[in-house]
Image: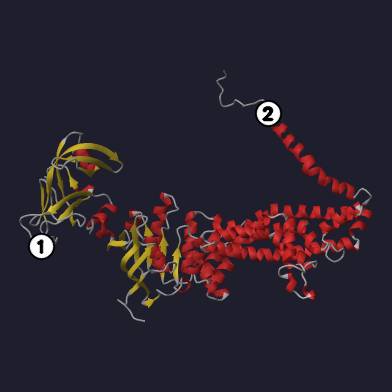
């Protein structure tokens, strides 16, 4: 034994488990997630970038992408405002049936999207419970409005789910302090509560938007899947693939995949930035 | 608007509050003069926080009224009262800088940008936060956050400052220093202030007057000196500082317990046979025959030294009293005393007191004696 204790350098044997476990992790992810995504890009660009571009700027493809983004946008606006309102009411007031309302808001995520679309048809369709009373020129189903309705339904609890926990853990004394300093409820909400929710609102909005852009099950039922009129991007991919136009489907798929990649990067990095200071 | 005792800045008049059947506050009355610091001292659950929240308008009393500078505010919502509350956790707005936090109250009042800036500069200088002006609360230490909270409340010239356990979140050393700083500051700006705390040392150091709360009632409200030296109830005596309590009764202008008998001063008024307690602070017990004592000495009984422990600046002795079954008295002795008259365990000592209080004990029945009747 050496007397020189301070100078001893600890050298443990090479830990095999570390590289091994990381390799296993990647090996599992490869066929399940990474390769399918990669193949979209491989196939999409296999005939050269020119043909990829031509497939992408086809009027129907452009329309489908625009429709997807527009309908998702309005669903996002609605659900963020609603989610903020619902989270505020439910976190600030205790009342009978509060938990029941929270469960009801959350239910839409648990319902299969095809069922959601079907349910909307049964309510608003031309022979639906309410739809039958609408005059023919005001029918909602098989129009872009139906797609917005379906998007709202399937993404209903997402923004709420992000905002609610932040509001619930927010110290009540912040709002009380604001009140004792002379602020009205609205001023307190605007100057004190809302700034602390910035991160949650942006996060909830992006989540809602990303989820709505990819919606398929409910959209195909309520939209009628009319090319150039009510065909969203996922429906376009499905239809073109069925028609054997793999390249056309592929081009739009690449855009959607890139889009979700961007959204999640923003979610990942921007939240820290928004939560900061 | 009518006025009561014109001078006082805050009037709290017969405040009562129940939470689900249990009384939290029971007929609370007190006043705070302009520039005065009143500390509400009590254990958790004594109702002190509720009083503060009612004054601020964050809680509604069942009965009672609040007057601020003679103006009835009982029915006004928090935002129209103009109180400055310093919350336990300071409640600084996390997304606003120090300067914005301080300016918030003025911004709500629609002051001009120039005025707000001037006031912020003034207050930042007052609380010595010049180099932290553009920092966010999360970047400040606890003591700095507290100063921001005070400056923020002072900005709109509040009717009264309300401090909710403001030192709770700070460590012991900083606490002592900040107490001094804040007291000096409050005396400088002359704003009436109400503190709540459960820390007796804090109360003694900060207060002009202390209100001792117990189970929703004020047991005593007086200067720190009076509350400590002349406690009016047993609870006050034991809550502020340590006290030895010996239960007994009144017998012809004497306090009696077993073989102990102490003559009462004329000023103490009791009825014959009334249950009472002898209250003695540990530092007022004397364990040797007096030779040249300046103070008035009253011998009590004999005792056996049970335990001697050294506690920093003084020595603490536990003495078993001879004639009272299993009753121990805690005695503290200064260094001069311990050096001159060392004690050993098992030693027999005479026990006497140089200062004491006899307080009526309303929880016990009066002792039935032949010499009856009350003479009040």
> Do callouts 2 and 1 point to residues on the same chain?
no
- Subunit of mark 1? B
Q: Residue at the location (52% across, 59% down)? A: A171
Q: Is residue B183 visible?
A: no
Task: Find numbered disc 1 in the image and state the secondary structure of the residue it sits on.
Answer: loop
B322, above or below A104, in the image: above
Q: Position of residue B184 (x, y in %)?
A: 38, 62
Locate residue A191 relative to residue B212 in the image: left or right. right
Locate residue A269 relative to residue B48 in the image: left or right. right
Locate residue B261 relative to residue B63 in the image: left or right. left
- Subunit of mark 2? A
Q: Residues within 10 Å of mark 1 (few under 14, many from 20)?
A: few
CA–CA distance in space, label 2 to label 1: 90 Å
Task: Find numbered disc 2 in the image and state the secondary structure of the residue it sits on.
Answer: loop
**Quadrant that contains the N terminus of chain B:** bottom left
Quadrant of res A141: bottom right
The disc label shown at residue B374, or none: 1
Q: Nearer the viewer, residue A68 or B331?
A: A68
**Quadrant that contains the C terminus of chain B:** bottom left
Q: Nearer the viewer, residue B375 or A116?
A: A116
Quadrant of res A115: bottom right
Name the residue beneath numbered marker 2: A15
Q: Residue at the location (75% across, 62% down)? A: A72
Q: Which callout, 2 or 1, points to the residue nearer the camera?
A: 1
A11, above or below A253, in the image: above
Q: Position of residue A269 (x, y in %)?
A: 69, 53
Q: Position of residue B292 (x, y in %)?
A: 12, 47
Q: Position of residue B147 (x, y in %)?
A: 47, 60
Q: Nearer the viewer, residue B124 or B309?
A: B309
Q: Is residue A31 visible?
A: yes
Q: Residue at the location (42% across, 65% down)? A: B53
């Amino acid at each position: 034994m050496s007397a020189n204790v301070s100078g001893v350098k600890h050298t443990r044997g090479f830990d095999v488990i570390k590289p091994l476990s990381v390799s296993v992790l990647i090996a599992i992810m490869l066929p399940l997630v990474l390769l399918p995504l990669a193949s979209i890009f491989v196939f999409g660009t296999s005939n050269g970038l020119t043909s990829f571009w031509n497939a992408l700027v086809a009027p129907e493809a452009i329309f489908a992408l625009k429709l997807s983004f527009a309908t998702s946008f309005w669903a996002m606006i609605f659900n963020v405002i609603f989610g903020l309102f619902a989270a505020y009411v439910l976190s600030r007031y205790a009342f009978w049936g509060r938990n029941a309302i929270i469960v009801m808001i959350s239910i839409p995520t648990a319902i299969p999207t095809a069922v959601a679309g079907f349910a909307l048809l049964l309510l608003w369709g031309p022979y639906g419970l309410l739809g039958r009373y609408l005059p023919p020129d005001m029918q909602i189903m098989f129009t872009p409005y139906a797609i917005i309705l379906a998007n709202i339904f399937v993404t209903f609890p997402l923004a709420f789910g992000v905002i609610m926990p932040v509001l619930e853990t927010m110290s009540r004394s912040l709002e009380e302090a604001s009140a004792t300093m002379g602020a009205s409820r609205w001023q307190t909400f605007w100057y004190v509560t809302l700034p602390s929710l910035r991160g949650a609102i942006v996060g909830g909005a992006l989540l809602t938007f990303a989820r709505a852009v990819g919606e398929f099950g409910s959209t195909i039922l309520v939209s009628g899947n009319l090319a150039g009129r009510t065909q969203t991007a996922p429906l376009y991919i499905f239809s073109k693939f069925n028609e054997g136009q793999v390249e056309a489907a592929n081009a739009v798929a690449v855009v959607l995949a890139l889009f979700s990649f961007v959204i999640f990067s923003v979610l990942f990095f921007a939240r820290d930035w928004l939560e900061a200071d | 608007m009518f006025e009561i005792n014109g001078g006082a800045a805050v009037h709290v008049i017969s405040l009562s509050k129940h939470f689900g059947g249990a009384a939290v506050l029971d007929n609370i009355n007190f006043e705070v003069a302009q520039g005065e610091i009143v500390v509400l001292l009590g254990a958790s659950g004594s109702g002190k926080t509720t009083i503060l929240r009612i004054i601020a308008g964050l809680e509604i009393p069942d009965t009672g009224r609040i007057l601020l500078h003679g103006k009835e505010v009982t029915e006004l919502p928090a935002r129209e009262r103009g109180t400055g509350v310093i919350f336990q956790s300071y409640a600084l707005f996390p997304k606003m800088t120090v300067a914005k936090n301080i300016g918030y109250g003025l911004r709500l009042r629609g002051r001009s940008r120039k005025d707000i800036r001037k006031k912020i500069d003034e207050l930042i200088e007052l609380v010595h936060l010049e180099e932290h002006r553009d920092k966010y609360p999360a970047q400040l230490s606890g003591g700095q956050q507290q100063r921001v909270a005070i400056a923020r409340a002072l900005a709109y010239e509040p009717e009264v400052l309300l401090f909710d356990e403001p030192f709770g979140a700070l460590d012991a050393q900083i606490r002592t220093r900040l107490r001094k700083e804040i007291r000096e500051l409050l005396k400088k700006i002359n704003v009436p202030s109400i503190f709540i705390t459960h820390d007796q040392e804090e109360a003694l150091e900060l207060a002009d007057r202390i209100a001792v709360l117990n189970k929703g009632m004020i047991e005593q409200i007086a200067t720190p000196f009076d509350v400590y030296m002349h406690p009016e109830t047993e609870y006050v005596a034991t809550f502020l500082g340590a006290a030895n309590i010996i239960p007994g009764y009144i017998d012809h202008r004497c306090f009696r317990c077993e073989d102990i008998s102490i003559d009462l001063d004329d000023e103490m008024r009791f009825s014959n046979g009334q249950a009472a307690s002898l209250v003695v602070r540990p530092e007022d017990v004397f364990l040797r025959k007096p030779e040249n004592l300046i103070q008035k000495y009253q011998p009590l009984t004999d005792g056996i030294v049970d335990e001697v422990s050294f506690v920093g600046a003084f020595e603490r002795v536990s003495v078993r009293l001879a004639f009272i079954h299993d009753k121990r008295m805690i005695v503290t002795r200064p260094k001069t005393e311990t050096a001159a008259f060392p004690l050993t365990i098992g030693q027999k000592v005479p026990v006497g007191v140089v200062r004491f209080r006899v307080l009526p004990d309303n929880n016990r029945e009066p002792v039935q004696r032949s010499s009856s009747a009350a003479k009040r």
